[in-house]
Amino acid sequence: MPDFEKSDRRFAWALVWLYPPSFRRDVGLGLVDAMEDRMRARREGGASSIGARLPAAVDAFTNIPGEWIDAFQRRNVRATPDTKDRSMADKLMQDVRYALRLWRRRPGFALVAILTLAIGVGANTAMFSIVNAVLLRPLPYSNADRLISVWARTSQFPRGLLSYNEYQEIRKQNGSLDSIGLWLGQSVNLTGVNEPQRLIGVFASGTFFEALGLRAERGRLYTEEESGPGAVKQVVVITHSLWRQRFNEDPSAIGSTMVLNGLPLTVIGVLQPPFDANEVPGDGYFINGDLFMPLALWPVPHGIANAGPFALSIARVKSGADVVTAAADLDVIGKRLLAADPKVQQGRTLFVEAAHDTVVGTSKPALLLLLASVGVVLLIACVNVSHLLLARAMDRQKEIALRAALGASRSAVARQLIVEAALMAAAAAALGFGLGRWALRGLTVLQPPSVPIPTNVPLDWTVLLFTGGVAIAVATLCALAPALKTARPDISRVLAAGARRASGTGRRTRDVLMVVEMAMSVALVAVSALLIQSLLAVQNVPIGFDKTNVFTLQFRLPQTKYTKPEDIALFFRNAIEKVRAIPGVESAALVRAVPFSGNGGNVGYVLEGTTPADPNSPPQARVHFITPDYFKTLRIPLLKGRDFTDRDDLQTPLVAIVNETFAKRGFSGGDAIGKRFTTPQTQGPVTIIGVVGDTKHYTATEPAVPQIYVAHYQVPLIFSSLVARTNLPPLTITDQVRRAIWSVDKDQPVWSIYSLETAVDRTQGQSKFLALLLGIFAAVALLLAAVGIYGVTSYGVAQRTHEIGIRIALGASSDRVLGDVVGRGVRLMLIAVAIGVAGAIGIGRLAAAVLFGVTPSDPTALAGAAAVLAFVALSATYLPARRAARVDPVVALAEE
Amino acid sequence: MSLRSIEFHVLLALAGEERHGYAILQEVTQLTDGEIELEPGTLYRALHRMLKDGWIAESSRRPAADLDDERRKYYRLTPLGRRVASAEADRLLRLVAIARSHRLLSRA
């Protein structure tokens, strides 16, 4: 037969293979023959290869779709009992029964396989539910895809606040927005009730409701005019949950008065959900509030129009427009504003992003990393189950070959395997779904900060579809290798091998499976090692103060009640004295923003005798307002000069203490004592009287920045926090501290009571959470891989018992046999490590955003992971290898 | 009842004797003086359909040994297939009669 004829036949087979199975079974062979004949005829007629084959291909492709449709329609028609061929459904049912029978006979096998898969599916369902809720689900507002955030961007702050003037100009000049609203959240004091309470308030413009598409469930919302300076109304809109809590859903709440920050405000409306904390992911998630007040009621000395940048924005783009058009539109407005006002900071531009990005931005890399990792765990589980099925199919190879020789369809066995895998996947999916939902509750309880897991993760169609898709993928992956391996058994070879099992059959497939599973384990172990290193790096960063045994709480004096700075200072002095008197308190002080509380502020400064490059944007320093003893309480080292004293007050010249970085950057030799600087917020120069050590303020990973400490008594502010060092567990003094403050002012609510240690640890929550979860995933992956390697090697040895017996009988030493089996494992392992390390670097890149102090290609992590896998793989190979070395040739050969 | 032309041709090709697939192709070409050259895919689609409908069946008999190509399947008309073919032939005959009465035929 000429070569081209052989390949013509293969070509015909390839085309016929695309037809539905029933068609192939009935007339497939005939069609191949006919196609081959036709191609030969064309060649004899002088056609080229293409000329012979192209019409065949065209012909096949015009008929295949119709045949599939026919096959599908035929399947829906029940075959009559007397039909010679049993219908596909019958065959499938038989396969199902057969699979169940196998499971009953070897329940351990089925159980291990299903449980392995269920854990994988469960982990994926749980992670995907979170990803779905956080990253995929739209924000709970109508047409949420049109919501955007507008920021003022400067070189220092990519997401800076907007000023009232900028807001007004954007409203007037834009052509791409339906509306834009301005808002800021701030706690407010509710008084005139039994116990003073702190509520989360939102000061918002009237347009805010319009932009978000919010409506009143009862009463009305306030308008833009009622919220702006000039015509501001003393009104408040409350959320449904506050209406329930405070008013017991009483309709007469509308029209009643709430005293907020000392102002009597009339309740005019109840907001319709989605302002419900359970609907959206937890704390800090976008807009979170109990009540909404007109923007102009925000307490600020000269009114909101003169307050500078102070508020966040939310805008809705016109239907048809998108983020890009809005960005272009606002960019022009930003440039115009810059040109019109010389006081605006150089380089200030307007920056637009989808509101959804604002919300999920920081958690995205962490979540995707977790999802990728559970995917890898599931793949390893599939590889293991795939191998189990393959091994069993190989054991049945002789039976299969015999059946094929007797005329059974070659695909019958493959079909049976696929059905069994599908059943396993279905069982695993059902079980895994339950496991996943259960695991999710566990994760929700952990409530890791900076990974916004909603308290109420919804079970929606997306999650169900995902789990279904995963199940299909699992079935396919598990059945693929075994089905391919058994679909075309080499009948003559298997039968020729006689009673012996053909040694080495399917060995290559098994090797590939083993390499895949080892490589994935290396990658996962390496990534979790990176995260653990990163966590350790975060924890080892010096934070500059002693976080242990410090009690903190926050309060805000109502400006309406404490109008004069003297009154505020007096309240503070009295409160501090009372707290110091509490037994167990070693020292106490006030600070405007406790480190790691998330609060804080910056101030521009100009050193005396210098002029900044751009007068509108002087260098910035982090500013802290503190009372004497703050450094002592937090154990921040005083490097030079002196601490504040009670005599640094409103009557004395302004003084400040700076940190080491400020001193080093500002003055040669760091000699700052006695030097002076000015800030836009203070009148006259401020004299530096001390230098203290650097401290971290928001996160342990932030770089060192210049810091200025200002005496609280010289610049009294209404918002303050108490810090107290105790020689008891800090929270044991909570009640005494509360009573101490209420003894000074019975109407003063306090909140955010926690130990400083908790606050610091919480900022490391994301790192810990990630390291913990990935550590678990990596451990599961390793365990699965170990089980898999052990299983594959044992199986290989068992299969080769006869061969090994002969070799030993011919004089091979048992060391030689041992070395042989282990050597084979080592070779596969080396390949796997190479692939796995490359994979780890790839995943590490994905994780780069959550890594600190370690690069994705960190050699320690990669080498460590490789070593761990080498140990596990060698152990898992050694045991079966030893068994091989102890094969007794007499027994092995007698098995014939 | 109308019949697809290709199926009628297959029935006609099998009316004389049992044939395997490629032989049917050649027979159809011959019967139509080369006017219809079926491609294998189209033919086998029809064959499959007709097998399912029971018009044709795989033949168990083999032709004379020297002509036999043993790996091939031969097809034969079933009684049902024969009835379908003759019904279609009758229908065409009636149409031809009508055409003739309207003087549409070039030859009598």
Image (spheres, coloured by chain):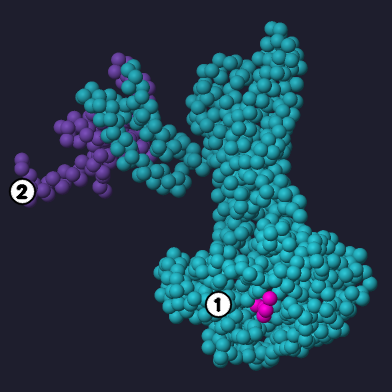
How would you rate the neighbour count of disc 1 (Cα within 10 Å): few for under 14, some for 14-19, many for 20 or more? many
- The answer to whether residue A684 is magenta is yes
Residue furthest right as drawn? A583
Q: Residue A739 location, x and y as percent? A: 87, 79
Q: Is residue B86 something that shows in the picture? A: yes
Chain depicted in cyan: A
**Which residue lies under the disc numbered 2?**
B103
The amino acid marked with disc number 2 is Arg
* Residue A526 % position (x, y): 67, 41
**Residue B15 or residue B8, whichever sits in front:** B8
- Name the secondary structure under disc 2: loop
Q: Colour of chain B?
A: purple
Quadrant occupied by the N terminus of chain A: top left
Residue A530 sits in which quadrant? top right
Residue lying at the far front in this picture: please name it: A609
What secondary structure predominates along the stretch shown in magenta? loop
At 38% from the left and 27% from the top, the residue drawn is A10
* Identity of the residue drawn at 29% across and 18% down: B67
Residue A398 appears left or right of A329: right
The residue shown at (74%, 14%) is A814
Magenta span? A681-685
Q: Chain of mark 1?
A: A
Relative horizontal placement of residue B35, taking residue A604 as reference (left or right): left
Callout 1, which amino acid?
A: Ser
Label drawn at residue A163: 1
Residue placed furthest toward the top? A810
Give the residue at x 55% y 22%.
A402
Residue A126: x %, y % from top left: 65, 54
Residue A2 vertical position relative to residue A843 in the rendered view, above or below: above
CB of mark 2 within 8 Å of CB of mark 1? Answer: no
